[in-house]
Amino acid sequence: MMLLRYAVYRTFTMLLTLWVVSILVFAIINLPPGDYLSNQIAELRATGQAEGVAKAEFLRKEYALDKPLYQQYLIWVGFIPGPLGFSGLIQGDFGWSFEFDRPVGDIVGDALWLTVLVNLSAVLFVYAVALPLGVLAAAKSETWADYTAGFVGYLGLATPNFLLALILFYYGHKYFNLPIGGLMSPEFEGQPMSWDKVKSILLHLIVPTFVIGTSGAAAMMQRLRANMLDELSKPYVETAKAKGLAPAKLLAKYPLRMAFNPFVADIGNLLPSMISGSVLVSVVLGLQTIGPALLTALKSQDQFLAGFILMFVALLTLIGTMISDILLVLLDPRIRYGGRGA
Amino acid sequence: MTPLLQVDALKIGFGTAPAVVEDVSFDVMPGETLALVGESGSGKTLTCRSVLRILPEAAQLRSGSIRFDGTNGPQDLFNLSERAMRKIRGDRISMIFQEPMRSLSPLHRLGNQVAEVLRLHRNMNRAQSKKVVLEQFDRVGFVDPERAWRSYPFEMSGGMRQRAMIAMAMVAKPELLIADEPTTALDVTTQAQVLGLINELQRETGMAVILVTHDLGVVANMAQKVVVMNKGRVMESGSAADVLGSPAHGYTQKLFNAAPMIPEVATPARAMEHDDIIMDLRNVTKTFTMRAGGWRKPVTVTACKDVNLQVVRGKTLAVVGESGSGKTTCARVALGAEVPDEGGEVLFYPGDGADPLPVHGMTPMQRTAFQRQAQMVFQDPYSSLSPRMRIGATLTEPLDIHGIGTRAERREKAEEMLGWVGLNPEMLKRYPHAFSGGQRQRLSIARALTLDPKLLICDEPTSALDVSVQDQILSLLEDIRDRADLSYLFISHDLAVVARIADEVAVMRAGVIVEQAPPDTLFYNPQHPYTQALIAAQPEPDISRPIDLDLVAKGAGAPTTWPEMFRFDALEAPALRELEPGHLVRCHA
Amino acid sequence: ASPLQETTFWAQEVQQGNLPPVHDRIPVDPLVVDLEEKGRTFGKQGGTLRTFVSRSKDVRQMVVYGYARLVGYDSNYSLYPDILREIEVVEGRKFIMHLREGHKWSDGAPFTSEDFRYWWEGVINNPLITPSGPPDFMYFDGYLGSVTFPDPQTVIFEWPNPNPNFLPLLAQAAPPFIYRPAHYLKQFHGEYADPDALAKEVRRARVKSWAALHNKRDNMYKFDNPDQPTLQPWINASPTGSSRQLFVRNPYYHRIDARGVQLPYIDVVEMQIVSGGLVAAKANAGEADLQARGLDFPDISILKKGEADGGNYRTVLWGNGAASQIAIYPNLNFADPVWRDVMRDVRFRRALSYGIDRRMINRALYFGLAKEGAMTALSSSPLYNPAYHFASAVYYPAKANALLDEMGLTERDSRGIRLLPDGRPMEFVVETAGERQEVENALAIVSDTWLEIGVKLVMRPLDRNILRNRVYAGVSMAAVWFGWDNGLPTLNTSPLYLAPTNQEFFSWPKWGQHYQSAGELGEAPQDDAPNRLLAMADGWSHAYDDKTREIFWREMLRIHAEQVYAIGILSEAPQPVVINKNLRNVPDTGIWAFDPGAHFGVHRIDEFYYENPHQQVSQ
Amino acid sequence: MSGIQPDNRFVDTAPWVDEVDASAPERSEMDASAWRLTWRKFKRHKLALVSGIFLLVCYLILPIAGFIAPYTPNERSADYLYAPPQSINLWHEGKFVGPYIYPITAKADLESFRWTYTTNEENPMPLEFFCEGNSYNLFGFIPSDTHLFCAPAGATVFLWGSDRLGRDVFSRILYGAQLSLTVGLIGISVSFLLGITFGALAGYFGGRTDWIVNRVIEILRSLPELPLWLALSAAVPSNWGPVAVFFIISIILGILDWPGLARAVRSKFLSLREEEFVKAAEMMGAKPGRVIRKHLLPNFSSHLIASATLSIPAMILGETALSFLGLGLRAPAVSWGVMLNDAQNLASIEIYWWTAIPMLPIIVVVLAFNFLGDGLRASLDPYKG
Ligand SMILES: Nc1ncnc2c1ncn2[C@@H]1O[C@H](COP(=O)(O)OP(=O)(O)OP(=O)(O)O)[C@@H](O)[C@H]1O
Ligand SMILES: Nc1ncnc2c1ncn2[C@@H]1O[C@H](COP(=O)(O)OP(=O)(O)OP(=O)(O)O)[C@@H](O)[C@H]1O
Ligand SMILES: [Mg+2]
Ligand SMILES: [Mg+2]
């Protein structure tokens, strides 16, 4: 009941925030000098392609890029009509990607599930590895198990992702015949799901999951370990021990839940990072996720694509923080969001 | 018959320091109750914990042996594997920890925590265990077991948490129950109920009990054997009749002499003057919204209702009453830690004719001044001490906050305070967890006193102290009161203590004050059935005069069963009437 | 000639009657390639060629590699009719194009002058599709050319004055497609299509107008619309957005070998989009059959290692066709007046050039395999002149110092850095696109030797778009880029790109803008030399005999050599090319250039074949 | 000394005095400050102590890196490109020579396109000590050209090989440490300062403060860093040195980076502020600042220490990601990130493995920080020892 009211209230705040973010996003995208089409024209001229110039000019008119920035913003969001009527974000028209020459919705839609797949598997990897190891490292702190886990984690952390990927690709291919780059064997692309395709995807996922996951896992593990160590000597753990609980269950039920507080706070970041996380890694690994599309769009100032992805990520961020705030109360009943003493 | 538990030449120490428990031996027979009494900090808790091998990380079991001879045959508890030990914990031997407030997980509902034992050792499913636990909750005196099941520990009063802890330890019907001061936070009628429950279980299952307590009355009523400890050593041990009847050791004699008693009162006292009051609680009502809900409709609890209390300058107002009746809540409201519901207000009179200050509407400046003059001793000293702050820092903090003295002076003051409460200055370096329960309670008192306050609210300040230390502390408090005109709002369950220190007593039950009078009047002529029940339930340290636990446990029964004159239903209580000058009773005309 | 042979790849389709037999597919007078003359061998049809690109829009590389043009360059960089049967040039101003009889689009529709007409009338002169009107190349000397279509096989382009730019333009790697598959595009054209159907189509494609739809479907160069018919050797057979693009042989392709086998030899090209950084790793793993794009010289050692470890490929080194592999462009239109004046002094530019130890750079970065020297026509160009190549391009710090001293820049600060006339230290900021490590390495070496002449080089990597915008705006002091794309000019190559006619030459963005915008933007060059370059370029355009043209060309190259507008460091840097061991007809030496050359284009990738195509397919 | 009485009761027979032992231990001992006590506990952590000393040495070396390195960072040995690591030996053919190296000569192998090196094992060339080399600045401002050791004329001393341009990897690592171990930490500090401050304010005060801080966090988090960096790379004035640019970038990174930490701090504080000891402190009159500093933060210090340790590798490596966008450090500045950036290709893994050596100091330093942090955490842990 209280939570329900809280959720409704947060939704309203969210819309407000989203609006502020939309202004900022638009401003930032347009911060670097030039715009997509003028860059495009320059590039076309530089490579001697007279032909494309006419097309670029055509698009400039059609997408109102010849209007002042504030009008472009209003058209983009859908507050005022563009050259061909209302068609903004709030009308459900996400715009056109000049770079890919397709509607923004299509591009994002295609890449979305791969993105979620890659990052979800990375997140699962992080949790699957970091949770048990972090708890173990805390329970067996200052033993070789603890040190080994820490060392391996830091090894992953201290290796630049791209280098790590290259190493894994190179030796993985050499010794285990793992594929290099991509998310599935090319012959499966556009094919319906089949057992072989799933296998291929899983095989391709190994290295990216590992590369994206290691740093996250190491970070989570160490933090969890620290938080767990704080909890382990608390009296309530002794009580639980006096009940005769087995260590694994005991740790999971009592101190882990306490130690989890800071991580729940960050669960809000999980959603957006599913989309925009690991951009650079995806770029260097050649994964067809949203990340590389975003980077390309930003670099070339493909403003509708970049804008939409950024707004999408922002929305997820907002939803994420809301979820994390609600989870926080569920996790720790003592937490209230009111002011002090109120 | 072989003893169920044999503790032999136990020696426990910390680091390189001399042992804190030395050469402790005793036997517990099945079905028997052994009382462990002794000075605060003498190692009782450590001894108990070593039976379950749950000692602080820094503690070392230096030597000795502990054997347990339960249904599974004799076992050497010191050399048992962890796995085998887990089978014993909670199942064969269970323990009630001394500080129930800290010993419960703050994130889990009480029901969940208690039922876990059953699910673990008795293979019960959720529904079965819930049924058993609710029953147990009822037997330890929860008026609304269902609410207790759903509550989080922080939503419960001190005594309620303690009862949950008791329920947790007893619900699985262990062979040996180690109860480390299980009733300190309970009023005497509830205490009687719990002790009765223990007795009952002993009769039913042949459970043996190690009962750590400071209350010699409880010892007299419960124990067959007594072990007296002091400074880590056993001073005297033997059958209860012998030890209580004719203490042989000097320490034992001293201890028993210090036991306070409710005085035999010949005449009622004169009414109290209420002209120079220092604090005035007016129509204080406090309603809490339970967190238990989540997505459901919120449930509210009225902790206290329409409480009017006046603390007279230089005098002691004692509040006694049922566990969960809102005493702590009133105290916290009085010092501004909680905001009362609309309509209530608390006024503080700085004295010297200055205008009264509304505690809940002060400017920051006024607040700082107020906080210097009014201090509180929390019911739960462990929680109120910063776990990561050394005691030295904790004790100097109030001075630090108010910018009093230099570093060295603060330090000296801290040492002096420690001396006052009978602790060693060497302890300044320790963290709160490295103290015994009674020591922490004294630390809490010491901290409250460092600022030389004008008003001190003590929430059960001596419950964890053995009678001789308690005597010392009470003398100290009286001394300061007389010397520095300090006023107390004193919450306690121990009527004997109240009788000694109070100038006026208010009795609370179910969130309202049912009777209020000077102690002598009250003990001479208790009017309210609840007050009468309380006085009757106070155990006496005389083995020849046992109280009938079952009888007094009934207390005064539910308010709806009281004589017509006092009866009330839910929160619709009759008004408080002045029967004779200074003697208020809640009754119909 | 020998009888035509049916293509195995399409044999089944032909049998089932879905496709006409080969003699009905190819033009009546196909282009018969003379393999023997080129020293090449006859091949077999079949096989899949795997290659990598790094961006999804690089699908267009297939138009480049395929290199079927109306007229194209041969491997000696002379023009010959390719798609056209013949082209007559009258007085250099009238171009009569003769199409091949029976030439068909890849969907079997005839390729006729109607396709040109559609381009001219339906596309170029339709204000909705092309709001900016006919493209620049249709204007010459201010006159718009005319296009006529006397019969289905003939198209005539005509200008009042001789237009020497027209044919080279058609042979470009990225040519203007002056013909469009009219039969296909008409369904998207407001003037031809059924309005209702069109409106539905517009909605389906989620675009805003039929013109946008037309534009979207009409991607001759982008090559991303599998439905659009083409004349290229391979046709796109994959949906857009896929990371693997398949290209299958064009059944109507107009070339055959002398034995009557229709080209291309290779059935399928599989182009996979991978991250740029992984191309070398994939090539090393033997996953590329023909790869140069995405490979840089530093990758050579790992490629050779893969070869030695038993990889099924060989690596050869071609030369890069840009006029300079790394060139520094001092911005003569820089906004800071003090710096600008310094940079406009030719002595300064020469001094910088003398201050570069090119040998060292060549050795460190290219094993000494590149050619050290200034930016000028490459050695394989008929216009090559060693004097220009080495002009101011030897390491001669004493001379550099002398030049700078002579300019009066004698004051130095405590670090030994010379001071500008207004007292600031000479911190010469060179901006790069930050894409090539070799540039950074080269600049690291340059900065060491420039210190000796008292100039401090500050390197600043930027994104290429940002770099361009900064240069154009005149806020960047100097930039690094390749030299002229076309390092292999012939007499008949327009030298316009040597003159300040476009802002893409980073030394004179403003002058270029002035020329491009016909005086509206930018600023006119005041100095002698640039104006002379403009005059020469104009002169070349109006010279019709080789002799005069050569004079103009050489004079322009001389001016560049003398003025050192761009400080070239080295050229003909080796470009690794990975070739499957079974792939035949791939030259061991060659020029890797976009224009002219179209990368593999001039080397006629449609003549490459597998020794054992069947084994290849099963891979 | 049996205390068993006839009635089976035990009475202790040892002498007993009824007195509290209030004798204070030594004064100096008493006055030991909290820091001293913590330090005493810390010292017992051998691994942490060793790590701390190691890091201290590292930082002490920074200002004199130029002295220890045989070469300056951008000194190229044109004839020794991609030279493999050379070892320093003491004994030559059973004879003690003192530290010496064998000279090497390079040959371009145009078959495999590598530089191949032959070692002349006949000719041991003793190292020179306190010799003259290229000049550098001691402590950043004292010009000097004396090096601890250098190669004798005609030889080279590449302890960890040389890179593509013939620069000594060992020396560059030493110089790189000067940046990698300092500038990045500034970003961390900024981020921690902001994160803790705002997180603490939001968590402790809750209500309106919490609302505002959370909206700021949400907005900052929604604003992707990528485009900001891109915009920045265009906006930084071009005559700024690489270090200055990097400095600014790392501060901006810090400014953008705090929300994560702030959320963690906030959520923990939301829970901690309900604790009884916080109430107790407040009721003694403690101001919010004090409650936060003395009561709340210490209870979250383990997490903070762990987070700080973890952000160090991120900061050292952050620039490799930045250089992807043209914003990283660049020549002539050297840092470990820059060096690794150069090593991000297959050849560096498979052929010129020594160019990837900069990973080593990163790992060692990070592990040292980790052990140090863990030791610190343990010595702040009241339950330990
Ligand atoms: N972690 C620790 N480090 C050092 N000393 C400790 C530690 N824990 C307990 N002690 C000391 O051990 C002694 C025995 O403690 P214990 O808790 O057993 O006392 P107790 O008899 O239960 O006292 P109380 O009645 O006050 O609860 C006390 O003096 C206490 O100060
Ligand atoms: N934070 C809270 N949320 C909900 N209910 C609360 C809260 N604090 C107290 N209560 C309820 O208020 C009632 C009064 O509690 P209070 O702590 O004042 O009792 P008490 O008289 O001090 O009892 P005890 O003697 O057991 O300490 C109890 O029923 C308790 O459950
Ligand atoms: Mg105790
Ligand atoms: Mg209470």
Image (tube, grey):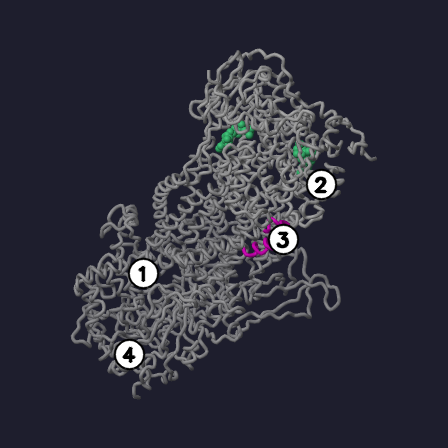
Residues at marks 3 and 1 touching, judged by CB atoms closer than 8 Å: no
Amino acid of disc 3: Phe
* Residue D225 placement (x, y as % from top left): 43, 50
Give the residue pinned by disc 3.
D67
* Residue B340 placement (x, y as % from top left): 46, 26
| C223 relative to A321, above or below | below
Q: Is residue B122 magenta?
A: no
Q: Name the mark on residue C502.
A: 1
Q: Mark 4 — on which chain does it sit?
A: C
| A67 relative to B469, above or below | below
Instruction: Give the secondary structure at mark 2.
Output: loop
Residues at marks 4 and 2 touching, judged by CB atoms closer than 8 Å: no
**Label 3 CA crowd tier, 10 Å (few <14, some 14–19, many 20+):** many
Give the residue pinned by disc 2.
B15
Locate the C terminus of chain A by quadrant. top left
Give the residue pinned by disc 4.
C254
In front: label 1 or label 4: 4
* Residue B255 placement (x, y as % from top left): 72, 26
Give the image quadrant in which the ligand numbered 1 is located: top right
Q: Which residues are magenta?
A: A136-156
In front: label 4 or label 2: 2
In front: label 1 or label 2: 2
With C15 as the anchor, is D311 left or right in this view? right
Amino acid of disc 1: Asn
Marks 3 and 4, how far apart at CA: 72 Å
* The one of B454 and B573 positioned closer to us in this rendering: B573
Q: Mark 2 — on which chain does it sit?
A: B
Q: Residue furthest right?
A: D1
User: Is label 2's Cβ within 8 Å of ligand 1?
Assistant: yes
Residues at marks 1 and 2 touching, judged by CB atoms closer than 8 Å: no
Instruction: Give the secondary structure at mark 3.
Output: helix
